[in-house]
Image (cartoon, helix red, strand yellow):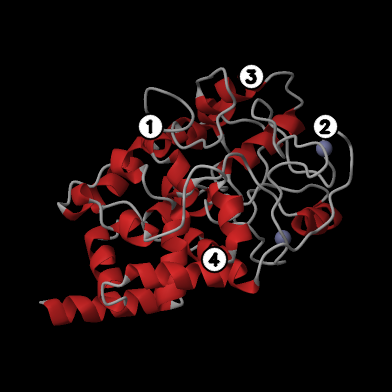
Amino acid sequence: MMQQHKAHVSFFPMPQSDELLDSVVYRYHQLAGHASPRQTFNELFGKFCQVVPKLMTNHTSHLLAKVPPHLFKERQDILAKHLLLPALHRIFGENHIKQAILNTESGARFGTDRIYYCCHTLLLQHSLQCCPLCIQEEQNEMGFAYWHRSHQLHGVATCHKHGCDLIQNCPYCGRQARHPRSMELPESHCLGCGKRWLPTYSFSESVNRLANLAYVTCNSGKMEGTDLVLFAKVVSAITGGNTAAACNDMEASYGSAYFKSIYQKEKDVRGDWLKDAFHREKFNRGEFGPWTLRFRRYSDLLMAVDNLFGSWADFDRYAVNYRKTAA
Ligand SMILES: [Zn+2]
Ligand SMILES: [Zn+2]
């Protein structure tokens, strides 16, 4: 018993609501006063990699053995509350989500897991994002701010709670909100130029609905895979096959500034991108794998659900009915 107790770290920060696991680890790193990330990672995950991983999705078994047992009842607790797996359940098939869950246990490479890595561009923004008003509130209430899970999904441009723009790069000097090699927590000012970040509002209200959808799915606790073939069929049924018209609606609703901000130069959103996103040949044949995920983005899913169904619950209802009628 004593032996087991000794194996635990002497303290570990209490994970906050919707806090990314990475963020909890950064807080531990700061509180422990470790000089290098190597020490923190070796201690908590039993492994180290040269670049500070953005998503600590594997080696959670090692972590669980290290942190005080009351913090997480079981591994499922970390997965459901502090990783992005609940968001993936909307986009991964049943086998992929099972594999992803299994991979969180250990895995050869520490850090961003292969299954996440393959869909990195699908799921995430380029770097971690934060909300200047959340930071202010958290610092006032608790003395620190943290990285929110639901702020990180691709297609999320505003804070679901405050409606202001999320910050990915400092608007003054362009430095990333979190330097890729650092274990920084979000601050009320830029750690590069020192200027204070103020809230800005660049998008229409409909863009904030997407942020809400992301928040809801991250906090749904659900981790069974969705049938994506069904998703494509339902989208096709509700649009009457006219996905091009739906694309026009979406462009009008979210505005070109939104598309420009989330896709940057990578994707041309003119034309029928919805059909392209959900009706790939491989995907229709059911051979849906991480490599085909590259062509799609989480934002595609968020926009389709918001624009065509209104909410996840309405989408689910529609899908159930569709399945019944089709059977
Ligand atoms: Zn906020
Ligand atoms: Zn700056």
* Location of residue 174 (image quadrant): top right
Q: Which label is found at residue 192? A: 2
User: Is 118 drawn above or below residue 171 in the view shown?
Assistant: above
Depth check: 107 or 1 in front? 107
Of the two numbered discs 2 and 3 in the rendering, the one whose residue sits closer to the viewer: 2
User: Is 47 drawn above or below residue 154 in the view shown?
Assistant: above
Relative horizontal placement of residue 241, taking residue 314 as reference (left or right): left
Amino acid type for the residue under numbered disc 4: Leu
Of the two numbered discs 1 and 3 in the rendering, the one whose residue sits closer to the viewer: 1
The response on whether ligand 1 sits within 8 Å of label 1 is no
Amino acid type for the residue under numbered disc 1: Arg
Depth check: 62 or 217 in front? 217
Of the two numbered discs 1 and 4 in the rendering, the one whose residue sits closer to the viewer: 4
SS of the residue under disc 4: helix
Q: Which label is found at residue 210? A: 4
Amino acid type for the residue under numbered disc 2: Gly
Q: Which residue is drawn at 30% across and 77% down?
A: 238
Number of numbered discs visible in the structure rendering: 4
Disc 1 to disc 3: CB gap under 8 Å: no
Q: Where is residue 186 in the image (x, y as percent from the top left)?
A: 75, 43
User: Is 312 drawn above or below residue 190 in the view shown?
Assistant: below
Q: Where is residue 24 in the image (x, y as percent from the top left)?
A: 64, 41
SS of the residue under disc 1: helix
The response on whether ligand 2 sits within 8 Å of label 2 is yes
Amino acid type for the residue under numbered disc 3: Gln
SS of the residue under disc 3: helix
What residue is shown with label 3? 39
Of the two numbered discs 2 and 1 in the rendering, the one whose residue sits closer to the viewer: 2
Q: Where is residue 23 in the image (x, y as percent from the top left)?
A: 64, 41
What residue is shown with label 1? 114
Alpha carbons under labels 1 and 3: distance apart: 24 Å
